[in-house]
Amino acid sequence: MSKQTNDFYKRLEKQLSDSSVWPSLYKFKFILKSDPLEITNLKNMFNDIDANISSNLSSSKNFTSITVTAKMRSANDIIKKYKLASEIKGIISL
């Protein structure tokens, strides 16, 4: 992982820790190509927690947005999910 990416995650973790009381409800948003395998892989990353997952297909049907709402135990748990998701080629985390 690059220093820039690592610094980003450290800043995000601090902001989340400072602004929330844990456990806390958190909304993840991702955009990825409309590849059923990759969408399934992303959704499976949240199988270990009670999560509400919704998806929307873009008008061109080339991309899918995924929203995951879940009660997270800590800022560190959120960072772990983002790092897992970043392994999917071409994913955009919002």
Image (cartoon, rainbow, N blue to C red):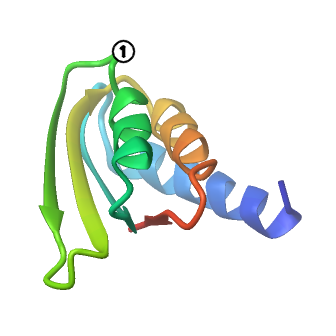
Vertical order, 28 against 42 (above or below): below
Q: Quadrant of the N terminus?
A: bottom right
Is residue 33 toward the left or the right of residue 5 in the image?
left
Local secondary structure at mark 1: loop
Residue at (44%, 36%) from the top-left corner?
41
Q: Quadrant of residue 25?
A: top left
Residue 85 location (% of width, % of height): 52, 46
Q: Quadrant of the C terminus?
A: bottom left
Residue 60 location (% of width, % of height): 21, 84
Q: Quadrant of residue 24?
A: top left
Is residue 59 toward the left or the right of residue 77 in the image?
left
Residue at (43%, 30%) from the top-left corner?
45
Q: Nearer the viewer, residue 53 or 36?
A: 36
Vertical order, 2 against 21 (above or below): below
Is residue 65 toward the left or the right of residue 37 in the image?
left
Residue at (38%, 28%) from the top-left corner?
44
Is residue 33 toward the left or the right of residue 55 in the image?
right
Residue 66 location (% of width, % of height): 25, 55
Q: Nearer the viewer, residue 62 or 86?
A: 62
Vertical order, 84 against 48 (above or below): below
What residue would you read off at disc 1? 48
Q: Nearer the viewer, residue 83 or 91?
A: 91
